[in-house]
Image (cartoon, rainbow, N blue to C red):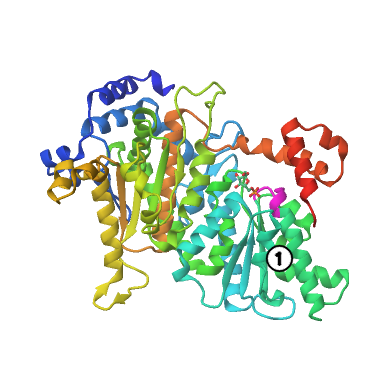
Amino acid sequence: MDPTTTSAWAGLTAHHAAVTPDLRAWFAKDPERARRLTFDAADLHVDLSKNLITDATLSLLVKLAEEVRLPERLAAMFAGEHINVTEDRAVLHTALRRPPHATPALVVDGQDVDTDVQEVLAKVSAFADDVRSGAWTGVTGERIRTVVNIGIGGSDLGPVMAYEALKAYKHPEIELRFISNIDPTDLAETLVGLDATSTLFIVASKTFGTLETLTNARLARAWLWEQLIAAGALKDDDDARRAAVAKHFVAVSTALDKVADFGIDPQNAFGFWDWVGGRYSVDSAIGTSLAVAIGPDAFREFLAGFHAIDEHVRTEPLATNVPVLMGLINVWYVNFVGAHTHAVLPYSQYLHRFAAYLQQLTMESNGKSVRWDGTPVTTETGEVFWGEPGTNGQHAFYQLIHQGTRIIPADFIAFANPAHPLQDGDVDVHALFMANFFAQTKALAFGKTAEEVRAEGTAEDVVSARVFSGNRPTTSILAASLTPSVLGQLIALYEHITFVEGVVWGIDSFDQWGVELGKKLALEIAPALTGDSAALESQDPSTRELIEYYLAQRTV
Ligand code: F6P
């Protein structure tokens, strides 16, 4: 269904033309607005009332969801239908977090999905327990103190974001590090100070064919051998090298044959399936590094958090369904209000990689120009997601959100309880931090009028510079604490928001063909950088000249 042909779309267009947003007036007229537009989903308390929406906007958006058959699309995803049409695959990240013994059993394309998921989870848990207890040792018998995850995109961003978010829960003697970039600086800097005898590498790659990851894995393997041999901890022969890999390398992949080709024993590999998209995979075996850091019990709580939101989105009526409403409101901003970007502003330093994680989730999913059937989209799709933790952002880019000419819808996320309840004399620092959270959403919504500015005795020539228009939309998401479960809930919330937007736009949110061309061209260009003159000559004039400049500058 082309969304622009629905009666709801026509209704929303007319509604947008007729309504001038005025949050001050809307709140003044309607004391129930905040209560009516606040919803709970599992442990998340979500206040939508500071958005530029009325009850009429919401009912038209819900009607749009019905007309594009969102409930049917959701049901199709949960049932394992091949809704990833361009790759002819099911989309079943929701199956990764179904509890053990869930009924009815989920069998998709002949696969007993529940049994397979629980089997891998048990294997990951046993491995995590072994590393945490010291039962798993390096080749010299040292216990593992550093786990280095080598992966990129979904095989990196999820684990690193979640590890940073849940650092308060990590094993005190085990540290995680992450290598993703093929820029050799990443590997070189990440390995600084590490003792090879107590370092374990997890090579995480859904396809086990990603240039960056395999290059870094080979470099890491060479580093391991070199360090161990130099320390006299390993004989310089093939058997000894194989033994070192067996104790210092494990893998996570859907391609276990390629894992074996790399030299990692498939016994030391954790599988998953093609129906898990890379950017939806932190809750699969791709989360193995996280499971080691926080332990299998906390990892299961993390999964239970996802599942709680899955159940909410699956069963809650559209009009009170939080991910559905948030996805629809995003559509409102993108397609009717004209927003191009969406800020995510966690008031939690632990969530400092959350926006980066969401960038892959949302932009790799919904950055599309064609519909499921290959025809061009009929409206704008996708937003640029971005953000930084508060209060840092307040002293950097909030100026533009408050007084710039663009509308930037923003999600503010915060927690009632700090992980570190510090006092500055009599002052509860977390309370001060949270006062900033509440102040920002209030200032953005209600602004400051010229009269209010004048009443402060401001000189007339600077009054206009000090006026805040207000009507800058925000959603506030609060929870009691940032626990593993709550983190899982937040991730699942944004996964489903992304899905809802994709359904309205009629796109396949689960492929990513847009990253392929650059990968192919890089392989074609690489010989031109190492002396292949034919490869250099075949480049376009701009690329050729840039490469020539690069070659002329290169001294190392
Ligand atoms: O960037 C494209 C992409 O395929 C992502 O979707 C994926 O998360 C990433 O590359 C890494 O892929 P893999 O896990 O197969 O190494």
Residue type at the position of mark 1: Phe
Foreground: 292 or 517? 517
Q: In which quarter of the image is residue 271?
A: bottom right
Secondary element at image label 1 = strand
Q: Residue at x 54, y 63 (%)?
A: 290
Drawn side of residue 313 relative to residue 457, left or right: right
Q: Judge whether residue 209 is colored magenta.
A: yes
Look at the magenta stretch and give its main secondary structure: loop
**Total numbered badges shown on the rendered structure:** 1
Residue at left 87%, top 44%? Answer: 531
Q: Eyeballing the image, is 62 above or below 178?
A: above
Q: Is residue 135 visible?
A: yes
Q: Give the range drawn in magenta.
A: 206-213
User: Dividing the picture into quarters, in which one does residue 224 lie?
Assistant: bottom right
Most foreground residue, 465 or 52: 465
Q: Where is residue 197 in the image (x, y as percent from the top left)?
A: 71, 77
* Vertical order, 136 against 277 (above or below): below
Mark 1, residue position: 249
427 inside magenta stretch: no
Q: In this view, does 134 lie above or below 472?
A: below
Please name the residue shown 62% across and 72% down the image: 146
Q: Where is residue 66 in the image (x, y as percent from the top left)?
A: 34, 28
- Quarter of the image with the C terminus is bottom right
> In which quadrant is the N terminus drawn?
top left
Answer whether residue 37 is visible to the viewer in this image. no
